[in-house]
Amino acid sequence: MTLDTFRLLSPDVQLHWVFEKGTFLANRWEGAGGVNLYHLADEGRGLFVEVSIDEERGQAVVLLSFRSSVPLEDYAHGVRLPEV
């Protein structure tokens, strides 16, 4: 699925795609809550989706969908590579 196609989907369908077809990659803390990062594959390198919990509604929401590597910098602190 392309990023443009994903963004045309309703919020509920976006979440369905993320939870059914996405691969969980990492999480980070923002404010009082957590943000989970998922990857959705396609013919290219795929797209990334950030999901969080809306505390008022008590349900998951898509915060951001992107292809750029720039937003991934927020997750770099959690990456630990083994020593060679």
Image: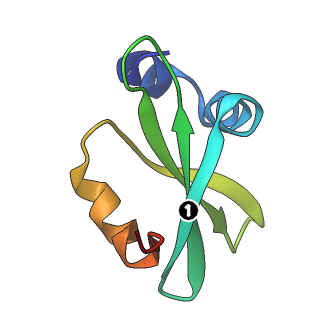
Decide if residue 36 is in sight here: no
Residue 18 vs 84, above or below: the answer is: above
Q: Position of residue 81 (x, y in %)?
A: 44, 69
Judging by the rendered image, the residue that carries numbered circle 1 is: 26
Image position of 35 (left or right of 75): right
Image position of 46 (left or right of 29): left
Q: Residue furthest front?
A: 84
Decide if residue 27 is in sight here: yes
Residue 65, quarter of picture = top left
- Viewer-proximal residue among 33 and 75: 75
Image position of 75 (left or right of 53): left
Identified at 65% across, 66% down, the residue is 54
Residue 72, quarter of picture = bottom left
Name the amino acid type tagged 1: Ala
Q: Position of residue 46 (x, y in %)?
A: 43, 26
Q: Residue furthest top?
A: 43
Task: Provide the secondary structure element on which disc 1 rests.
Answer: strand
Identified at 59% across, 80% down, the residue is 33
Identified at 56% across, 88% down, the residue is 32
Q: Quadrant of the C terminus?
A: bottom left
Q: Position of residue 5 (x, y in %)?
A: 44, 16
Q: Position of residue 83 (x, y in %)?
A: 43, 74
Q: Residues within 10 Å of mark 1 (few under 14, many from 20)?
A: some
Residue 30 vs 65, above or below: the answer is: below
Residue 74 vs 60, above or below: the answer is: below
